[in-house]
């Protein structure tokens, strides 16, 4: 199972759009895909017509348990309109996680633990992370084998890229293996049309 995280410490650069588009392409190629929405805004969850304010089970549940079981993970998984793609949805409760995480150890590996239980079920996992360095982004970076960094082609987004590169260096010091990453320029056509 290949695990890719999509992250940038700047919002509005196309993280969710990149994840959904890649999932569709991979599903069309016959891959079984799992999308993991770690953003409290729940944009990816909303994209698949689920309301992040109304869900009974979500990825938030992974952080409320010390032991993660396959049964619990199965309860979180939701189908999408594409039979090749499943979703681990977000709820707005994820926004409270940073406060609840104070003093709790081991929360940085909850997503990785859950994905290990699904290793034979999916070919590819795409993790959409929030634009904030915290417990949720750390989970995405700890779980992934490769990082995709969407970068809008404008000045402020490039400044945000500098922060993201520093974060990658920090993560590389903590990991046993180097986190490889790919920069994905976004919104290029819009920029070109404006000239």
Image (tube, grey):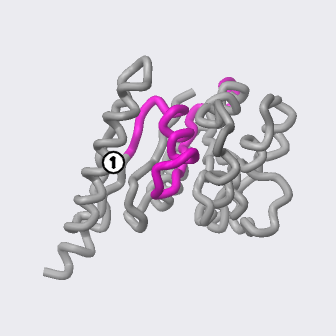
Report the number of numbered marks: 1
Question: In the current view of this chain or complex, which residue is farthest to the front?
Answer: 103
Residue 7 is situated, as x and y percent measured from the top left of the image, at: 43, 49
Residue 122 painted magenta: yes
Residue drawn at (36%, 28%) of the image = 172
User: Which element is circle 1 on?
Assistant: helix
Residue 120 is situated, as x and y percent measured from the top left of the image, at: 68, 24
Towards the viewer: 49 or 81: 49
Residue 73 is situated, as x and y percent measured from the top left of the image, at: 79, 38
Residue drawn at (60%, 51%) of the image = 38
Question: In the current view of this chain or complex, which residue is farthest to the bottom?
Answer: 194
Q: Quadrant of residue 191?
A: bottom left
Residue drawn at (76%, 69%) of the image = 53
Q: Which quarter shows the N terminus? A: top right
Q: Which quarter shows the C terminus? A: bottom left
Residue named by callout 1: 164
Instruction: Give left or right: position of 86 versus 20.
Output: right
Question: In the current view of this chain or complex, which residue is farthest to the left?
Answer: 195
Instruction: Give left or right: position of 132 versus 154.
Output: right
Asked if residue 29 is positioned above or below residue 82 in the image, the reply reads above
Asked if residue 36 is positioned above or below residue 113 in the image, the reply reads below
Q: Residues within 10 Å of mark 1 (few under 14, many from 20)?
A: many
Residue 91 is situated, as x and y percent measured from the top left of the image, at: 71, 60
Give the extent of the magenta segment.
Answer: 119-148
Residue 26 painted magenta: no
Towards the viewer: 8 or 2: 8
Residue drawn at (54%, 43%) of the image = 126
């Amino acid at each position: 199972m290949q695990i890719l995280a999509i992250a940038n410490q700047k919002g509005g650069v196309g993280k969710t759009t990149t994840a959904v588009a890649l999932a569709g392409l991979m599903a069309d190629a016959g891959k079984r895909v799992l999308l993991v929405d770690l953003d409290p805004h729940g944009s990816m969850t909303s994209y698949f017509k689920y309301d992040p304010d109304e869900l009974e089970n979500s990825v938030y549940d992974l952080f409320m348990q010390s032991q993660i079981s396959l049964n619990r993970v199965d309860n979180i998984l939701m189908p999408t309109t594409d039979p090749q793609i499943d979703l681990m949805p977000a709820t707005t409760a994820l926004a409270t996680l940073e406060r609840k995480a104070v003093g709790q150890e081991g929360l940085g590996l909850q997503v990785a633990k859950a994905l290990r239980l699904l290793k034979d079920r999916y070919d590819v996992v795409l993790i959409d992370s929030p634009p904030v360095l915290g417990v949720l982004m750390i989970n995405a970076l700890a779980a992934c084998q490769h990082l995709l960094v969407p970068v809008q082609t404008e000045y402020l987004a490039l400044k945000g890229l500098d922060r993201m590169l520093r974060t990658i260096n920090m993560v590389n010091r903590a990991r046993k293996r180097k986190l490889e990453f790919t920069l994905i320029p976004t919104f290029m056509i819009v920029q070109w049309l404006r000239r």
